[in-house]
Image (cartoon, rainbow, N blue to C red):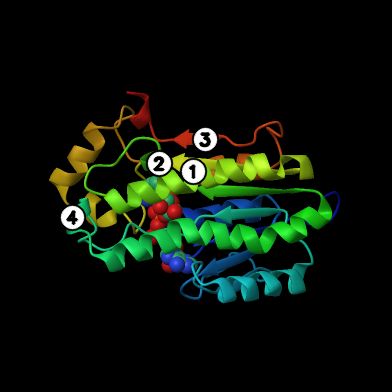
């Protein structure tokens, strides 16, 4: 799509990586639609804040309809909303089924439903970029987070499937795979010095990432630079999966 203000939709934009991504894309000149379970803050008064559960097909359709009614186009979708499940969502036989369902609904069904709702307008314009925030857990299993690991493997392969299916239509799809990032999702662990030390000891760069460092990667993808890249897993994990 050429000319005019580019429009990005960011799910889970109310916190952590999503919030940092919204701030960065706003600086980059995008008009933003932010979707979250709870009313998300917006960086710019012109941005659109929408409350929706990404696992709810009707709510997602309504939210995307509201974006198109306001902006008339969607250039970039950032599938960022995600959850690890509650504290009991650990190894397989101890994970409550309700936690499994919530993790899959948010981390797999969410990107599927949001992409499904956004792709028709991208197809109509012959351009677009779907960026899915998977995880390094989609590449190398995180111990004690079985449902989350499975969901991120699925999210990564979903991003690759989109890349194949929509390349001829001018639409790209890439995944970003962060390692350990300091956000509300992980802060409880980082607040316990022994747990934080364990995490850092496993990261070659010796520290967790800040949300801005993942937003950097999303910003570069969203910019349209690296335009030959599709179906890629952009790993931003301080070397965690390099071993
Ligand atoms: N923090 C990390 O270490 C890390 C590492 C790798 C990948 N990730 C991924 O990055 C993404 C963002 O994580 P974060 O660390 O910023 O988490 P976070 O908990 O700070 O933010 C997640 C946001 O998503 C929203 N959300 C959750 N479920 C939703 C739903 N069903 N519908 C709409 N919104 C929903 C939450 O309300 C929240 O605002 C997630 O997909 C996560 O799996 C995070």
Task: Mark 3 and ligand 1: say if the CB distance to the nearest ligand atom is below 8 Å.
Answer: no
**Disc 2 to disc 3, how far (Cα)?**
12 Å
Question: Which residue in the protein does label 3 denote?
Answer: 234
Q: Earlier in the sequence, mark 3 or mark 4?
A: 4
Task: Judge from the rendering whether residue 66 lies leftward or rightward of residue 182; answer left or right.
Answer: right
Q: Quadrant of ligand 1?
A: bottom left
Sort mark 3 into few (<14), some (14-19) or many (20+) by Cα contacts within 10 Å.
some
Mark 1 touches mark 3? (CB < 8 Å): no
Task: Mark 2 and ligand 1: say if the CB distance to the nearest ligand atom is below 8 Å.
Answer: no
Q: Earlier in the sequence, mark 2 or mark 3?
A: 2
Q: Earlier in the sequence, mark 4 or mark 2?
A: 4
Residue 235 place in picture, x, y as percent? 47, 34
Q: Earlier in the sequence, mark 1 or mark 4?
A: 4
Task: Mark 4 and ligand 1: say if the CB distance to the nearest ligand atom is below 8 Å.
Answer: no
Q: Which residue is at the far top?
A: 243
Residue 186 place in picture, x, y as percent? 30, 53
Task: Judge from the rendering whether residue 170 lies leftward or rightward of residue 76; answer left or right.
Answer: right
Looking at the image, which residue is at 54% across and 57% down? 111
Question: Which residue in the protein does label 1 denote?
Answer: 156
**Disc 1 to disc 2, how far (Cα)?**
6 Å
Mark 2 touches mark 3? (CB < 8 Å): no
Considering only vertical position in the picture, is 54 above or below 243? below
Q: Does residue 63 appear in the picture of this structure? A: yes
Question: Which residue in the protein does label 2 denote?
Answer: 138
Quadrant of the drawing holding the C terminus? top left
Badge number at residue 93? 4
Residue 226 place in picture, x, y as percent? 68, 32
Q: Which residue is at the far left?
A: 194
Mark 3 touches mark 4? (CB < 8 Å): no
Sort mark 1 into few (<14), some (14-19) or many (20+) by Cα contacts within 10 Å.
many
**Disc 3 to disc 4, how far (Cα)?**
32 Å
Q: Secondary structure at mark 1?
A: helix
């Amino acid at each position: 799509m050429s000319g005019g203000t580019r429009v990005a939709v960011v799910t889970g934009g109310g916190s952590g990586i999503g919030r940092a991504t919204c701030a960065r894309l706003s600086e980059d000149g995008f008009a933003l639609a932010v979707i979250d379970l709870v009313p998300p803050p917006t960086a710019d008064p012109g941005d659109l804040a929408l409350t929706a559960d990404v696992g709810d097909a009707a709510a997602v359709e309504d939210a995307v309809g509201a974006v198109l009614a306001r902006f008339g186009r969607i250039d970039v979708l950032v599938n960022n909303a995600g959850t690890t499940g509650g504290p009991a969502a650990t190894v397989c036989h101890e994970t409550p089924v309700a936690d499994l369902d919530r993790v899959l609904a948010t981390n797999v069904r969410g990107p599927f439903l949001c992409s499904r709702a956004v792709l028709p307008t991208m197809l109509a314009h012959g351009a677009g970029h779907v960026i899915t925030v998977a995880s390094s857990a989609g590449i190398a299993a995180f111990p004690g987070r079985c449902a989350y690991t499975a969901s991120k493997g699925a999210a990564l392969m979903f991003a690759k499937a989109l890349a194949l299916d929509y390349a001829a239509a001018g639409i790209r799809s890439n995944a970003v795979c962060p390692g350990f990032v300091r956000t509300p999702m992980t802060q409880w662990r980082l607040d316990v010095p022994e747990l934080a030390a364990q995490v850092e000891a496993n990261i070659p760069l010796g520290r967790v990432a800040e949300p801005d460092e993942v937003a950097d990667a999303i910003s570069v993808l969203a910019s349209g630079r690296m335009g030959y890249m599709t179906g890629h897993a952009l790993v931003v994990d301080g070397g965690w999966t390099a071993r």
